[in-house]
Amino acid sequence: MALQSSGAISLLDIRTELGAAGAISLGDTAVRTLGEVPSGAISMSNFYGKSDLQEVVFDNAAAAWGTPQDWNLWNIFVYLGIAITSKNIKVTLKNITISSTATSIPALETGTGWPTGTNLHVYLQNASVLGRGGNGGAGGFKAAGAPGGAGGAAMRITGAISGGTIKVELGATCYIRAGGGGGGGGSGGSNYVAQDGTSYFTGGTGGRGAGTLGAQTAGTNPSTYSGAGGSGGSYGANGANGIANDYAGGTGGAAGAALVNNSLATKVGWSGNYWGALA
């Protein structure tokens, strides 16, 4: 929170804003940085309205960031050479859709490497974060259908910040969508015809779960003598099982999580804005 814009101001006020412990002076580097007076004469009036908050905004309204995938916020800070100038950091992601390239990689994560004592605030506005949908299981041939693949996570708190905090806030028009599980493959089947003997048929392929690649898809049903593949799950939902025929249908894949390690963060504005578990 910013210092007062008028009236009396003290070193105690400045120390509180900086979150510092012990005695401070106007000549301290952190104090001069807050007052925006790196050298020379400095007075208490230099601190009116100042805030020890470093704000970094990634606005994709003009597609400056293209079609972002697999965003690790700490790695992005390092890659872009963004220096840490405060223990209070607010990262705003706006007008943006972030997706994932693999079910094993969340679309967005906080990353590790934040300095001890950092209070990280991730704020999303008009943003979507999409986990990757699980693949459908293969149909069986003289065998059971294969299981559907698990969906991927939308977000992950990579780890706690030593001596600090993490807050994830969803503003207006935000959607956090875990990948749906893939549908299970259908059972193999057979058909006996007296003059021709037995013919064998491959089961249907399960559908893809909803996620980075779009909405869920239905399983296929290539033959009336084999089992159909199960449909992929919608955002944050398990895939359907494949249909049994001569053998078992494959089980549907599990849905991904909306937020992994959610207990490590304070969540604001999440009600009704996410699909998938808080793991």
Image (spheres, rainbow, N blue to C red):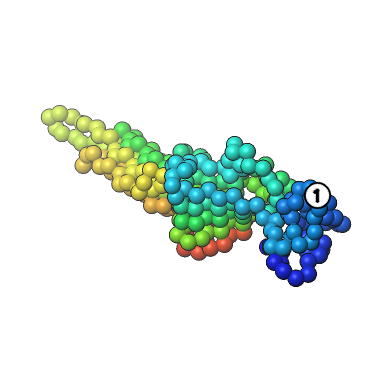
Q: Position of residue 228 (x, y in %)?
A: 28, 43
Q: How many marks?
A: 1
Answer left or right for 2 relative to 205: right
Closer to the camera in the image, 193 or 277:
277
Closer to the camera in the image, 35 or 117:
35
- Taking the spot 56% from the left edge, 55% from the top edge, the residue there is 123
- How many other residues sit within 10 Å of disc 1, few (<14), some (14-19) or many (≥20)? few
* Residue 279 appears anywhere in the view: no
* Residue 93 appears anywhere in the view: yes
- Most distant residue in the right direction: 23
- Taking the spot 41% from the left edge, 47% from the top edge, the residue there is 211
Q: Position of residue 187 (x, y in %)?
A: 31, 40
- Most distant residue in the bottom direction: 7
**Residue behind mark 1:** 40
Q: Position of residue 40 (x, y in %)?
A: 80, 49
Answer left or right for 51 relative to 179: right
Closer to the camera in the image, 265 or 79:
79
Closer to the camera in the image, 140 or 263:
263
Answer left or right for 263 relative to 269: right
Q: Quadrant of the N terminus?
A: bottom right
- Most distant residue in the top direction: 196
- Most distant residue in the front direction: 41
Answer left or right for 185 relative to 263: left
SS label for mark 1: loop
* Amino acid at pointer 1: Gly
Where residue 134 sits, quadrant-wise, is top left
Where residue 67 sits, quadrant-wise, is top left
- Taking the spot 34% from the left edge, 42% from the top edge, the residue there is 206
Q: Position of residue 97 (x, y in %)?
A: 45, 48
